[in-house]
Image: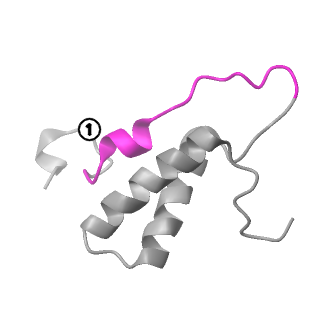
Amino acid sequence: MPRGSKQSYTGKQRRRASKIEKSGKARGMSSERAKQMAYATVNKEEGGGKRSGSGRGKKVNRSASSRGGHKSSGHKSART
């Protein structure tokens, strides 16, 4: 499988990346940058593409997308 191929993602991961990509374009990103950001977010939250085997059913951490543009600090004064 060539590098950069999106075949190793599940349908759900592709749909999530598509929605994230659309929001990036709406905020003025280029198409290429929005796609990179979308798949980077999916990778961060779900740990990459499909995986087989037992013990793979880990809870997904959605903190990267729920933060949604805020600074990483949890303090109110740090947000812009």
Tell me: 14 left or right of 19: right
Q: Which residue is mark 1?
A: 74
Which of the 4 quarters of the picture holds residue 21? bottom left
Disc 1: CA contacts within 10 A as few (<14), some (14-19) or many (>=20): few
Which of the 4 quarters of the picture holds residue 26? bottom left
Colour scheme in use: one colour
Which portion, as a residue range, is magenta? 53-70
Q: Residue at x 75, y 41 (%)?
A: 50
Between 80 and 19, the residue placed more toward the observer is 19
Vertical arrangement, residue 25 with respect to residue 22, above or below? below
Instruction: State the quadrant of the C terminus.
Output: bottom left
Residue 38 picture location, percent across and down = 48, 58
- Number of numbered discs present? 1
Give the main secondary structure of the magenta stretch. Answer: loop
> Is 18 one of the magenta-colored residues?
no
Tell me: 51 left or right of 17: right
> Is 63 one of the magenta-colored residues?
yes
Q: Amino acid at mark 1?
A: Gly
Residue 25 picture location, percent across and down = 33, 69
Between 66 and 50, the residue placed more toward the observer is 50
Between 60 and 79, the residue placed more toward the observer is 60
Instruction: State the quadrant of the N terminus.
Output: bottom right
Q: Residue at x 74, y 65 (%)?
A: 5
Residue 73 picture location, percent across and down = 29, 45
* Mark 1, secondary structure of its residue: loop
